[in-house]
Amino acid sequence: MNHTASHSRSTFRLRGIDLRSLAWFTLLVACGSLAMLFPYFWLGCLAAIALLIFSWAIFAGIRRAGLEFWQALAVAILSGYLILNYGFDNLAIHVGSVPILISYGAMYASFALCILAHREPVYEALNEPALVCVFFILFLSFVHLLSDLPNYGMWAIRDSTMCLDALFLLMGMVWARQRNSIEFLTKWLMVIFVVNMFYSLTLPWAESIWSWSPQTGAFQEVPLFGNFSGSGDLLLEGAVFCICFGSYVVSRPRWLMPLLVTGQLLGIAVTQVRRMYLGIVVVVVVLVLAGEIKKFAKLFVLVPIAIAVVFVATTIGGLQITGRIGPVNLDFFKDHIRSMSGDKDMPGSSVESRFTMVDEAMDHFYTHPIFGVGFGQALLEDTDPITGVVTRMPHDSSITYLARLGVIGFIGWIVLHLCFLQRFATAFRRRHDCDKRVYTLTLWLFLFYILFMIGSFVEGPFEFPSKAIPFYFLMGFGLGLIRWRMSPTRNVQTPSRTDIA
């Protein structure tokens, strides 16, 4: 027996050399050599492997959670929207001259299945005041489309999605009604934020990623990979999620959440999104006003740590990193922040250009102030110097609603957001009468709402389904939590500890 074991070991060793270790060492050397010769090819391979691991984790979680088909379909599309954003948004096939957006069609198919499968919760949700505003805006939109569709064709439908996508409030509310779905949703969000963190750090190689990425689109071809529009916003939203709710999703090890928060703050340094600098300040203020001192303290400590890491790496260590519009170092960030006050010759688009866009869009509003100009025509005449495509919206979603739906529609838009704020105020009043984890999740949803709306005043997130649909879905989920999980008169609906985990 000893002779057999000795013989077996000898087959893996040759004169003291472990052949198995030698094989692994040779493989690693070969991979490293090829990576030096063909860096972008191997970067693509790593991205493909990461995508496969991410897909496997999502579908494994779906199986364990026992989700319905419409939920699984919605999770798959929402994942693409949040990570790949504009590229996934434009994933399309053409039937003749008619473009069909695959992700958009699949998301509405999921919505239809949700409505058919859960009629009773849908009827209950229709009593939500926010949905009354949504249906009012939809009615105005359909009236406009009666005349705009013959005149502008698919462009009218494309512009009207900023109103149509509000229907996903209803899907989010139904999701919150499903008792076994809350735990999965919070874990899924954690996975999304972690994947987005690593994906955002590849931004310095964006041009190379575009070069090998497949391209598709409804009106112009767009690379599927390498679009980082909105990634900076999601990084801060993810960092706040880890601070507020991360310990309920992953309780051990304790150092993991601070590490993820720091990593996402460093990602903001690479994506260089000015509105998120302001977003950090607003989150700090909201946490203090809400009495969440521990959460405030975590953010207050981790932001300087992230700044210190950037300083050590770039100034002391001499590391050179290219961000979205400039180098990653403290001098750049000083100038980038100063540009928000209107200082000239600072990095980033000028404040004046934003006002020029607003003025041009308002000229359309003045021609039809009551009901707006409707859908189909571009609100700006500015042309992108790189793509040659007309910039259709003024980088301010509120102005877009005002110009397209007029005063009547804009009033409905404002009341919709007042309904959101009223519901979050209700959640704050009920915070002592409900499960603490439900309130903490609702607090994060409120912070998500604030950060998204900050972005809507300087960009046009509501005009893109890849941003609007996740927003409305999560807001609907928040409304459902407040309506069905936080009411002290509905204790039967309060989830158990394992439901929220």
Image (cartoon, rainbow, N blue to C red):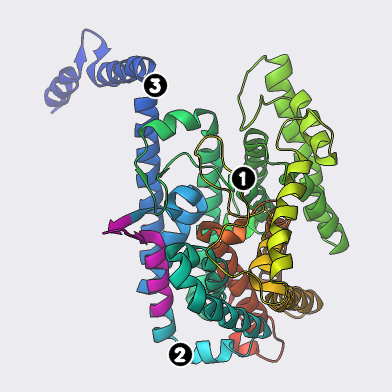
Name the residue located 80 percent from the left edge and 41 percent from the top edge.
Answer: 301
Q: Which residue is mark 1?
A: 382
Q: Is residue 374 left or right of residue 39?
A: right
Q: Is residue 231 left or right of residue 296?
A: left
**Residue receiving disc 3:** 39
Residue behind mark 2: 119
Please report the bounds of the magenta region as a residue range.
Answer: 93-112
Q: Secondary structure at mark 2?
A: helix
Residue 284 lies, with reference to residue 28, above or below; the image says below
Badge 1 amino acid: Asp
Work out which quarter of the rendered image holds the C terminus and state it: bottom right
443 vs 142: above or below: above
Question: Marks 3 and 1, how far apart in space?
Answer: 38 Å
What residue type is disc 2 on? Arg
Indicate the amino acid at tag 3: Pro
Residue 95 falls within the magenta-colored stretch: yes
Q: Nearer the viewer, mark 1 or mark 2?
A: 1
**Lower position in the chain sequence, tag 1 or tag 2:** 2
Question: Dot 1: what SS?
Answer: loop
Label 3's element? helix
Q: Nearer the viewer, mark 3 or mark 1?
A: 1
Residue 477, above or below 471 = below
Residue at horizontal 61 percent and vertical 57 percent from the top: 461
